[in-house]
Image (tube, rainbow, N blue to C red):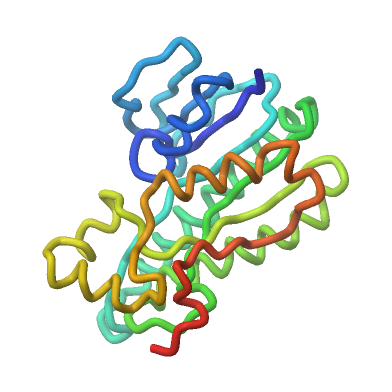
Amino acid sequence: MNKILVIGGSKGIGNAIVNALISEHQIINISRSAPLQPHNNLTHHTCDILTDELPNIDEIDALIYCPGSINLKPISRLKLDEFRNDFEINVVGAVKAIQKYLPSLKKGNNPSILLFSTVAAKLGMPFHASVAAAKAGVEGLTKSLGAELAPTIRVNAIAPTVTNTDLASKLLRNERMIDSIKDRHPLKKFLDPKEVADLATFLISNKANSISGQVFELDCGIVSFKI
């Protein structure tokens, strides 16, 4: 049974990852609210990743950093503080967690780090300037640390398209918008959080021992779709 630290596991993709792993692994969750489902394999720490001191953890086998943002506005309406806030939650929070738990990971069994980007970091999409810039930083961090921490710690990222979570609820708030999102994807669908969790489970497993420094686009075909 591995010890896996999930940051942001109370909702959305993070919670789907907790659910996917909890029956076979010891999960430590750090987030501002506790996951709704208690479990014998779950330990929760209430903590704001940006403002609070992170708890000490002696040894972990994987660190999964899930916090993110969807701040969609025209560039003319985006304030500099919004760019800063998106960068803080997506990049600085991940760096803070990695720096804190790097010694714990080095004690782990086949340790790995998993981060999250978005398809918007590579695919030009209107109104995504702030989140795309922040997530591009996540992808740069993934590739840099994949080289720097090798061969001891593997580092990868997942770049999902629209996923049915509370964070994306404004994009999926009515049938017309749902149909529009589906039509923009060649596979005529968007993601369920469990699909993202399945890929996350694979990337921190021993089956992915030869994979590091990679960003996996879980995109329903949209990257190859002409918009």
Point out the residue furthest to the front here. Answer: 187
Q: Quadrant of residue 206?
A: top right
Point out the residue furthest to the bottom here. Answer: 226
Q: Quadrant of residue 175?
A: bottom left
Q: Residue at x 74, y 35 (%)?
A: 111
Q: Residue at x 35, y 62 (%)?
A: 190
As drawn, is 138 to the left or to the right of 40? Answer: right
Total tally of numbered discs in the picture: 0
As drawn, is 1 to the left or to the right of 76? Answer: right
Q: Position of residue 49 (x, y in %)?
A: 46, 40
Q: Nearer the viewer, residue 81 or 112?
A: 112
Point out the residue furthest to the right here. Answer: 151
Q: Residue at x 21, y 71 (%)?
A: 179
Q: Nearer the viewer, residue 2 or 207?
A: 207
Up-down: is 125 above or below 139? below
Q: Position of residue 97 (x, y in %)?
A: 59, 40
Up-down: is 225 above or below 40? below
> Which quarter of the image is occupied by the C terminus?
bottom left
Q: Position of residue 142 (x, y in %)?
A: 67, 58
As drawn, is 74 to the left or to the right of 46? Answer: left
Q: Nearer the viewer, residue 217 or 10?
A: 217
Q: Nearer the viewer, residue 28 or 173?
A: 173
> Which quarter of the image is occupied by the N terminus?
top right
As drawn, is 55 to the left or to the right of 75? Answer: right
Q: Position of residue 100 (x, y in %)?
A: 64, 35
Q: Residue at x 56, y 45 (%)?
A: 200
